[in-house]
Amino acid sequence: MAHQKSSPEPGPLRKIDEAVIAPRRTRRYRAAAFQTYVIVGAAVFFTLAVVAHWVAYFPVDLRVTRAVQAYHGASFARLMYDVSWLGFPPQVFVICLATAGLIASFGLRWEALACLFAEAGVIIGTLVKLVVVRPRPSAGLVHVFAQLHSSGFPSGHVLEFTCFAGFLGFLTFTLVRSSIGRSIVMGALAVLILLMGLSRIYQGQHWFSDVCGAYLLGSVWLALSIKLYRWGKRKFFVRQPVAPEVPEGAATASSG
């Protein structure tokens, strides 16, 4: 009796592909959702930036600032000052470089480089400031902690932390095993991002719409940073010491 030829066992890369990689239909849906968000988010931000160039502030900006500043607790004021302080140079650059260096020391080389790319979103924000040239809140309208003379739209502090802390949250979510510690880190990063926007309004150095513009631009840049990270990880950093990836085309080649 002739032996029936058994189908070969799938190789290890094939098993990884089947266990980790989402189905093609899901990948296409996610790609479409990602592209839609980037396009819509960029369009909304562009519209807001154009309007901000011509309108110094909106009625809602004044209402929000006065509502936030109505609370005069000493502890809250100190918290707002400390959070804002983190976003000023040189400390913000020290924080970002030190964090990227720490990540690289753990063997996550591509993750460290991607963190710096995410932080580079502040360069885009600076260019937008030069084009929009929107005045910051006036001391005649609200309390201003310290008058700054650069353009107000978008908030650089909020943009930096949305991009950088947001990317750290993404790395924590995708790389670290589920644990209470992971949840605490992700929650702390989310709170820091939200508090940064609140602190800029509380100190009278940005309008509510400046902060919203920064969150919007920051989230678009964050999405692009994640896209670049996922593309580059599988293309160039497949043999790094920690969390290596399956190289592009390897699974297909091994099963061919």
Image (cartoon, rainbow, N blue to C red):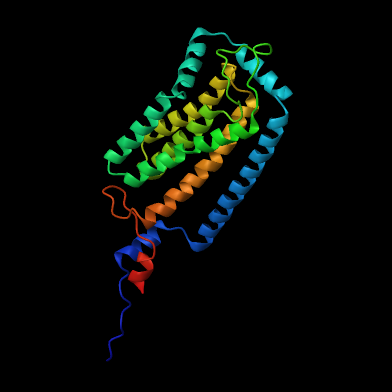
| Residue at 34%, 58% in the rendered image | 246
Q: Measured from the top left, where is residue 27 in percent x and y?
A: 51, 58
Left or right side of 39 for 236: left
Quarter of the image where the C terminus is located: bottom left
Classify residue 245 by image quadrant. Answer: bottom left
Please state the horizontal and vertical placement of residue 248, each as a whole percent of the image.
39, 62
Q: Quadrant of residue 16?
A: bottom left
- Percent across and percent down for residue 154 are 59, 30
Residue sitting at 65 percent across and 13 percent down? Answer: 142
Q: Quadrant of the N terminus?
A: bottom left
- The part of the image, by quadrant, that contains residue 93 is top left
Residue at 37% across / 40% down in the picture?
A: 178
Please, is residue 70 above or below residue 232 in the view? above
In this rendering, the answer to whether 132 lies above or below 82 is: below
Whether residue 131 is situated above or below residue 16 in the rendered picture: above
Residue 5 vs 36, above or below: the answer is below
